[in-house]
Image (cartoon, helix red, strand yellow):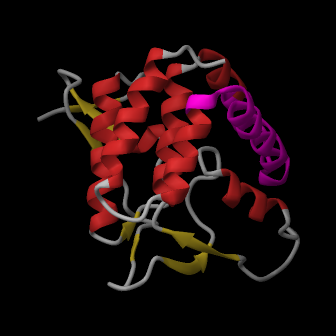
Amino acid sequence: MNYTKLTSLSLTQSENLIDIIEYLYDSNIIHRDIRPNNLMSDKSGQYIKLIDFGFAFTLDINDKSKELPIAGTIIYAGYEFLNFCSKIEHNTFWSPSYRYDKTFDLKCVLNIIIYMINENVQAKLNSIEELLSTKEKIPRLLELWENVKNKNTKYSKLLNTINKLTKSSDFQTLKDQLKELYNKKIQ
């Protein structure tokens, strides 16, 4: 089966993406590099595949998080991760570490969904991505995602649900809220 790069996301595809993250969540796997370039679709657009598990890791069975060297995407990362990165001294010789939790990928997916369905966010993220240094990108990303959270109650509600996620069955609540997001034009 041939797969192509995704350029947009329908509600069904977004729900499929949430299902993929639920599978990873249940398997104690954190991908850490979820971004549009790592999402593929079959020719019909019906099935999504997540690729490039180079930065992925598996949590021990009873762990909910693990401290690891920072790697993978920052553009679509959640606010907590970006806030942490904003406080790092980027001129040091040591490799900074971050405590990745099981919801890290879910926050990236939510930000990708917003990116894919909102032209304004897409334009801003594309312009941020063109900046050369991570040090320049992080404050702009923090501002962008904070603005989206403050202006869009559906996005904010989804983030709150993700932050309270404790079991696999909570993923259905996320998918229900996702429908509300698609029914509302994002500011």
- Residue at screen point 85% across, 77% down: 92
Q: Which of 24 and 94 is in front in this view?
A: 24
Question: Would residue 79 appear left or right of 49 to someone viewing this image?
Answer: right
Q: Is residue 6 above or below residue 111?
A: above
- Residue at screen point 84% across, 54% down: 135
Query: Can residue 51 be seen?
Result: no
Q: Magenta includes 127?
A: yes
Q: In this view, does 174 lie above or below 147?
A: below
- Residue at screen point 60% across, 19% down: 186
Part of the protein shown in magenta: 125-154
Q: Position of residue 3 (x, y in %)?
A: 23, 33
Question: Would residue 63 appear left or right of 17 to someone viewing this image?
Answer: right
Which quadrant of the structure image shows residue 84? bottom right
Q: Position of residue 106 (x, y in %)?
A: 46, 51
- Residue at screen point 48% across, 32% down: 113
Question: Would residue 2 appear left or right of 153 to someone viewing this image?
Answer: left
